[in-house]
Image (tube, grey):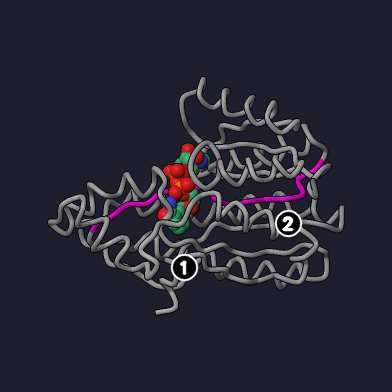
Amino acid sequence: MSLTGKSAVVTGSTSGIGLAIARGFARDGANVVLNGFGKPEEIEATRTTIESEFGVRAAYSPADLTKPDEIGGLIALATETFGSVDILVNNAGVQYVSPIEDFPLEKWDQIIALNLSSAFHTMRAAIPHMKAKGWGRIINTASAHSLVASPYKSAYVAAKHGIAGLTKSAALELATFGITVNCISPGYVWTPLVESQIPDTMKARGLTKEQVIEDVLLKAQPTKEFVTVDQVAALAVFLCGDGASQITGANLAMDGGWTAQ
Ligand code: NAD
């Protein structure tokens, strides 16, 4: 229970990777602030299950992270409810698949706002609290697409390369304050985000669902297996421990060998 007494904000934690990370922190004793969209009754069930399963407290913020003025409220919820924000995971993200010339402008703006700018806004609000305590952990869920590109994912690749750079800059600024800043860069993880992009990829490339899975998604991943959400969560928990205090500014790939190629 190495995280007992800490509080963690995990953006985009009503589903997928973020939910697994929030549950991983709670299992290790942290109080957590959940955030993201979904059916209210399902989110409430997720929240109460975390509390009863792990004996911690869990709060929920519905903040839309494409709206900077809602992000202050997310960090304030953590400090007002738990007295601090010790751990911040910028995880919320969406994908859109299209050739650049057809890429809807509002999709570009949404992906840059959510997958990149929201991390700047959360960090800006949380860093003073971490500095005051002389301890903090910031983890950004980037992607293999922070290191390499794929066609038809221009906004996503631009945002993810951006968050890798933001991570390095923040790590250098915060290196002497007991605050580490790192990215985790998963390859393909089987979550709703991956499942939901299959129809658009089928359309953009003229492929069947099976062909998208075998020839597009797992083609890039030498192990030919999807990463699991629990594997990503285990790395996030490790990054919060004492053993990781000298890891900062790193972009940690968990991609079955994809970016080794
Ligand atoms: P997901 O769709 O399961 O979860 C996304 C979460 O973000 C959900 O909780 C959703 O409600 C939330 N969200 C969406 N729009 C939001 C908004 N405007 N404000 C606040 N929350 C919002 O997806 P996932 O696969 O778990 O992805 C999580 C992160 O991991 C993303 O940043 C994604 O880019 C990254 N990632 C995913 C994969 C993968 O293969 N699944 C690979 C590499 C990186």
> For the point 53% across and 42% down, which residue is it?
12
Circle 2: residue type? Cys
Q: Is residue 86 magenta?
A: yes
Position of 108 relative to 169 (above/below) = above
**Circle 2: is it few (<14), some (14-19), or many (20+) Cα within 10 Å?**
many
Position of 249 relative to 216 (above/below) = below
* Residue corresponding to mark 1: 146
Depth order, front residue of 250/154: 250
Q: Residue furthest bottom?
A: 261
**Residue 259, image x and y in percent?**
43, 74
Instruction: Say if disc 2 is inside 8 Å of ligand 1.
Output: no
Secondary structure that dominates the magenta span: loop
The residue segment tinted magenta is 84-98
Quarter containing the C terminus: bottom left
Q: What is the number of the mark on residue 192?
A: none
Q: Is residue 112 left or right of residue 24?
A: left
**Residue 166, image x and y in percent?**
59, 66
Callout 2: helix, strand or loop? Answer: loop
Which of the 4 quarters of the picture holds residue 103?
bottom left
**Residue 89, image x and y in percent?**
63, 51
Callout 1: helix, strand or loop? Answer: helix
Circle 1: residue type? Ser
Q: Is residue 73 magenta?
A: no
Q: Residue furthest left?
A: 206
Which of the 4 quarters of the picture holds residue 62?
top right
Residue 178 visible? The answer is yes
Mark before the other along the chain sequence, 1 or 2: 1
Q: Is residue 177 left or right of residue 142?
A: right
* Residue corresponding to mark 2: 240
